[in-house]
């Protein structure tokens, strides 16, 4: 079985997807304090395989580095290269209505997530919302175009309207049990302790 990359944005069910696979004892890595995204970037600059240092995992989730404010969402830059370097991989574009997503980001970490972006970029909230809106729309269009006629490689999954059966059917080789699916609370603990550093404050 190949790698699985979750390439939708954070605040679109990334934690719930990650926990669901974790419950099936599938090795998962989620965010890792931004180190996952930062490592992918540094590996790329060094000419290394993008996942060097994280090779043992199957599912890669929430590949975002908050402190890389201009380009924090690493998978929007690297999903094509991940596809090339790791043939046979599957991708999940986890989705929700864009305005709901923006509001969720504004509430994230009691508003601190958005405030950090505004401070670094020297913009107000309305300007930040437009940047996020444009980024979201562009990334979604790019992903859908890249995976044209590759429905077996990309799962388009709306957390607002799609049943978990859509996900379990797409990954039927993993024999995922839909009864284990559910919304995950911030204080939920993951079985795999290898990547939980800082998880409660960001998910």
Image (cartoon, helix red, strand yellow):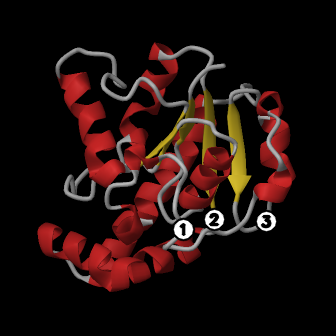
**Mark 3 neighbour class, 10 Å CA radius: few under 14, some 14 to 19, many 20 or more:** few
Q: Nearer the viewer, residue 61 or 181?
A: 181
- Residue under the point 86% across and 50% down: 165
Q: Is residue 2 visible?
A: yes
Give the image location of residue 45, x and y in percent: 18, 24
Image position of 57 with respect to 134: above or below:
above
Q: What SS does tag 3 mark?
A: loop
* Label 2 secondary element: loop
**Image-quadrant location for residue 95:** bottom right
Residue depth check, mark 1 versus mark 2: number of the one nearer the observer: 1
Residue 68 vs residue 201: left or right? left
| Residue under the point 56% across and 68% down | 98
Q: Position of residue 80 (x, y in %)?
A: 47, 26
Q: How many marks?
A: 3
- Residue 151, x across and y down, in percent: 76, 31
The residue where tag 3 is placed is 161
Residue located beneath label 2 in the image: 96
Q: Earlier in the sequence, mark 3 or mark 2?
A: 2
Q: Position of residue 149 (x, y in %)?
A: 74, 26
Q: Secondary structure at mark 1?
A: loop
123 to the left or right of 13: left
Q: Give the labeled residue for mark 1.
A: 188
Q: Which mark is residue 47?
A: none
Res. 163 in view: no
Cα gap from disc 3 to disc 2, whole angstroms:
8 Å
- CA separation in Å, label 1 and label 2: 22 Å
- As measured in the structure, the alpha-carbon distance from the residue carrying label 3 to the one carrying label 1 is 24 Å
Name the N-terminal-most of marks 1 and 2: 2
Task: Look at the picture and state if 17 lies above or below 75.
Answer: below
Which class describes the residues within 10 Å of circle 2: few (<14), some (14-19), or many (20+)? Answer: some
């Amino acid at each position: 079985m190949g790698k699985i990359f979750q390439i939708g944005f954070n605040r679109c069910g990334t934690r719930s997807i990650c926990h669901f696979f974790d419950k099936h004892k599938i090795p998962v890595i989620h965010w890792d304090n931004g180190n996952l995204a930062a490592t992918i970037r540094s590996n790329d600059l060094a000419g290394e395989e993008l996942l060097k240092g994280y090779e043992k995992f199957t599912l890669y989730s929430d590949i975002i580095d908050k402190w890389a404010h201009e380009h924090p969402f690493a998978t929007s830059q690297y999903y094509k290269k991940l596809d090339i370097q790791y043939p046979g991989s599957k991708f999940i574009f986890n989705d929700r209505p864009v305005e709901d997503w923006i509001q969720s980001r504004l509430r994230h970490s009691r508003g601190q997530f958005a405030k950090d972006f505004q401070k670094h970029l020297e913009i107000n909230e309305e300007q930040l919302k437009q940047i996020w809106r444009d980024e979201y729309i562009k990334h979604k269009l790019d992903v859908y175009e890249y995976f044209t006629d590759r429905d077996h490689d990309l799962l388009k999954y709306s957390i607002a309207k799609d049943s978990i059966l859509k996900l379990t059917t797409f990954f039927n080789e993993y024999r995922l049990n839909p009864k284990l699916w559910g919304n995950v609370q911030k204080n939920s603990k993951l079985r795999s302790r290898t990547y939980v550093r800082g998880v409660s404050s960001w998910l």
